[in-house]
Every structure is written in C-alpha cells, then in structure tokens.
Image (tube, rainbow, N blue to C red):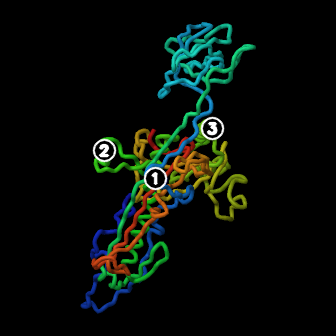
Amino acid sequence: MPGQILTNPTFALQPAAEQVALSTNYITNFDFLNQYLPDTYEKEFERYGNRSVASFLRMVGAEMPSASDIITWNESARLHTKYVNCASNGVLNADNATITVNDANVTGIAIRVGQTIMLFDNATGASNRGVVTSVTLPNQFGVAYYEAGGQSVAGAGNTFTVWVYGSEFRKGTAGMVGSLEAEPVIFRNNPIILKDKYAISGSNMAQIGWVEVSTENGATGYLWYLKSEHETRLRFEDYLETSMIEAVPAEANSGAIAQNLVGSQGVFYVVSNRGNIWGGGTPTTLADWDTIVSRLDKQGAIEENVVFVNRDFSFDIDDMLATLNGFNGTGVAQSASFGLFDNDVNMALNLGFSGFRRGYDFYKSDWKYLNDPTMRGNMPTGNAAANVNSISGLLVPAGSTTVYDQVMGKNAKRPFLHVRYRATEAENRRYKTWITGSAGGAATSDLDAMEVNFLSERAVCVLGANNFVIFRYGA
C-alpha cells in the first residue's frame, strides 16, 4: 500500500504581515533574572525560499504604454462562410429547396446567387452539393442540387450545416451580384488602478533589532522596517501580475458597480469565455492531447505553444511521456529512453520532460502561482465534473500576431499576451512609488512617519484568445 503525506502537521498559511507592530514582530525577552544567555541565530532563516509568485507575464508577454481609459483592437474573422444551424424545406429527393439560416447573431447571410454550397445533415452525415439560385430573405436562400436524386434526407425536423466552396455561372452572363465586406471583430478592455502603502513611524525607524533580516532582492540589515517595506513592495509586484490573471469585469447590478468600479478582463476570464476549455482536470494520455491538437487545428494552428502547469499536471505529462519511451515504473528506463546519456543506470535518472511534439510543439513550464498554497495551490479539485474554479494549467501560443490598434491607428505586431499601462509624456503610471511624511528622507508633511506609496494602472490584452487553452477540473 503506498504511503501518503499526513494532513497534520500541514503547511502554514497565516500571513506574517500585520497592520500594526505586534510583540510577535520583535524580540521582547529582556529577562535579566535568568543568568544564562540563549544561543541565538542572528540571521533570519528563509524557510519558504522565494515567496514571490510573479514571473508568468514577464516570461510570455511584454509591457507597452496606453493613453486611454479603453484599449481596443481588431482581430480578423474567418475567411470562409459556414453556417451550422440551418433548416431546409426540401423533401426527400427534392431537386430544389429553400434553406433558412438560424445561427445565433446572424442578421444577414454572406451567401450570393451563383455560389456553390455543401449541404451536410448534422445527424446522419448525408450531404448534397448545390448552386444558389436566389436569396429571398436576410437569412434565407434557394438552392438547386447537382445530384439527380435530389436532397438526400428530408428537411423536416433535421438541422444542416452549409458552407460555400465556390461558384458556377453560365456562359455570357453577368458577374457576381453583390460583394462581401470584411466584418470587424473588435475587442476591448479597460485598465484598473492598483495601490498599496507601507508606513513606519520615525521612532521605530531608529530602533535597532537583534535579528538580521534579509529580503528576496538581497538587502540585509538589523532594521526590521527594511524587511516590512520590502515585503510590501514585493507583495505589490505580485499583485500587478495576479490582478491581470484573475480580474473580472463587474456585472450589472453588482456590488462593485454600486461602488463605481468596473473591473477588468483578466487572462482566465478571457480564455474561459473566448478560448478553449479542457474540463477534465489534466490530459493524461496521447488520446487526450490528440483532442487538444484537433481543436487547435480548427483555431489558429500556432506551431509553438507553452503549457504553464501546476505540479500534478507536470507529473501527468512526465508519466505519459515516460511510459511512451519505455519507462517500466521501477525507476529504470527499459530502452534508449530519455535524459542525458540515455539515463545510464549509474547516473541520476531524469524523470522530467521540458516539452514534446504532437502535431505542434508543446513546451512545459511549472507555474508557481498554481502551486503556491497562499494562492491557487490549495484549491480543492472536488467534483471534477462540477468544480470549474480549480485550474491546473494554461496553454499560451508563443510568438506575436498582427492586429489593428485602434489607439495607434495602424497595424502593429503584439505578443499574444501583453500588458498595457497608462502613460503619457506628463504621467507614467506603469509603476509609481513615492515617499511622504517627515522621516526616511521625506519632508512633505509634519507626520512623524515615513509612508511609501505604490500605484499602477494597467490592463492585460489577450489577442487571439481562440488559440489559448485553459485546463480546469469542471466540465
């Protein structure tokens, strides 16, 4: 029976940060009645390593300025015409029929007289080819079939898919009647303002400590406020990224709207609404990945993709690839399997993979944000069919795309995923920090304290969300 990690003791989740200076933040044991001096370690031990979760957007995106409250861009629509919810009034073996397009959000069909179409029954797969003889209503057209047997199935009660594959005209006739205008597909997002502040009194700034603190950026010293100020800065920098990932727009009649807050469209929100969703937790077999590849074929077919994963997803990929390469589950590769020098038995066995190719190139990268227990790393998977909030990974296309930038008024190459921050020649709100008060070098007021203020105004732009895949446990 395999062992398991016990639930008690568990990992600590209580934050170290407090709004006020409590006794737990400082050494207060001044008991001189005890003649024995304790042996203490002066340097603070970093038991959680690098606690920052930021890095995702720095790896896959870029930052660029924006001078407006609204960021808009235009993405290309499909080139060819296809409708998937059509009805036919033709009976079985009818030579002619009238087709009605019932697709949602279609107010006028892009089908013209003389075009040749394929009619495909959604239930049985029976098909016909025909030529359009008339366009009678904004969503209705007449068709004459090429087959002598006429319409292959009765139209009553059936739904059909129709797409245009060409045209045919008689000799000596006029050209095509009407033209097609490219329809813009415009998306938009708006930036949000993020703020934070750290305050310390002038008296406490002059208080020496017994503990030598260290910070993630390498700063050290015996002044405790150095650590608290740095952690505030580090926390704010994390929020700059996690806000772009998790932000959602405020819905009508919501409490946020009542506070005059509008929210923003974060990465998870956009991909969940305009991208692709894998609802089974993590794909664990090649058949699962074939399903993903098949969907990507129908989207932008981007050649290289990066999959940002949590630990379980990473192990599932490793196990799948190890099995394919002859790993027998006993810790030894059975054949010229994987890893440096073919994983010789006298060397450390490498059970991890950085990527694979299955139709497209997929590069795997661990995403700390999905593993950190103070963020998404401690969310229960629950019922895999019902829990849509536990996310195990995100597939991001690599490279950039060309879009029409409404603000710039021209085509521009942009990474699929990037951040726009508010900035003009007079004001740059990418990352603002300033000190107020009368301590720590500030001389802006009579407040006997130093206040370090942080501010940013930004939004994330997800271009071509149809090329992204979000992996979650809910169907």
Identify the residue under disc 1. 68
Task: Choose the circle earlier in sequence order: 1 or 2.
Answer: 1
The kind of residue on which mark 1 rests is Ser
Q: Who's the residue at 55% across and 57% down the image?
A: 62
Where's residue 13, x and y in %?
Answer: 36, 62
- Mark 1 or mark 2, which is nearer to you? 1
Q: Are marks 1 and 3 in contact (CB under 8 Å)?
A: no
Q: Who's the residue at 66% across and 46% down the image?
A: 303
Where's residue 137, x and y in %?
Answer: 51, 17
Identify the residue under disc 2. 254
Task: Tell me the distance, in whole angstroms, between the alpha carbons under discs 1 and 2.
Answer: 25 Å
Question: Which numbered dot is residue 297?
Answer: 3
On screen, 211 above or below 318? below
Task: Choose the circle earlier in sequence order: 1 or 3.
Answer: 1
On screen, 422 above or below 210? above
Horizontal side of residue 71 vs 113, given as left or right: left
Q: Secondary structure at mark 1?
A: loop
Horizontal side of residue 252 vs 337, given as left or right: left
